[in-house]
Image (spheres, rainbow, N blue to C red):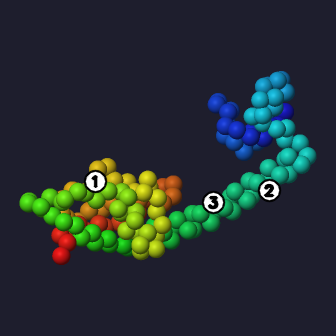
Amino acid sequence: MKVILTNDVDALGKSGELKDVTDGYARNFLIPKRLAVPAAGGAYRAWQHDVASREEKRKKERAAAEIAAQRISSTTLTMGVKVGEGGKLYGSIGAKDIAEALGRRGIDVDRHKVDLDEPLKMLGTYKVAVKVFAGMTPEVTVVVEPKG
């Protein structure tokens, strides 16, 4: 029996996939637990339409991510900070600070997408990766210099 999964099912597939399973497994487990619906009539046509619209949406997201990646890789952020002895900063520059600085430049990035192992605590120039899409991680240049 062909079913369309409505939730992720371990060892079977992810939500939205069309699967061919035994009749008993579908009737006694998947359908009663609302993990799947039979792929018949309207449900199958709706699934086909959903797949097409998801693919279109993914293409648009990828195109937007490529533009953002290009803008990020060509951006240099200059962060002016208070400095103590030996070039150590008062405080540090974290992922949130970098995300906010990119936001001020018109590039909206979630702070969780900024790939920074630990905050920047010294003066210098750093390359920081930003995850914008699967397999796309451009690097932004961050220059940390003394304020004033």
Query: Helix or strand or loop: what does disc 3 sit on?
Result: helix
Give the amino acid type for the residue marked by disc 2 in the picture: His
Q: Secondary structure at mark 2?
A: helix
Q: Residues within 10 Å of mark 2 (few under 14, many from 20)?
A: few
CA distance for labels 1 and 2? 45 Å
Say the numbered circle drawn on residue 58: 3
Distance of label 2 from label 3 (alpha carbons): 14 Å
Q: Which mark is residue 119?
A: 1
Q: On residue 49, which mark appears?
A: 2
- Sequence-first disc among 3 and 1: 3
> With 92 as the anchor, is 101 left or right in this view?
right
Q: Amino acid at mark 3?
A: Arg
Report the residue that reaches farthest toward the right. Answer: 41
Q: In x, y percent, where is residue 66?
A: 51, 67
Which quadrant of the figure contains the C terminus?
Answer: bottom left
The numbered mark at residue 139 is none
Instruction: Report, in whole angstroms, how far the alpha carbon at label 3 lies from the one at label 1.
Output: 33 Å
Q: Nearer the viewer, mark 3 or mark 1?
A: 1
Amino acid, disc 1: Pro
Query: Badge 3: how crowded within 10 Å, few (<14), some, or many (20+)?
Result: few
Which residue is at a point 85% across and 38% down the rendered structure image? 38
Q: Residue at x 28, y 72 (%)?
A: 78
Relative horizontal placement of residue 24, taking residue 90 as reference (left or right)? right
How many discs appear? 3
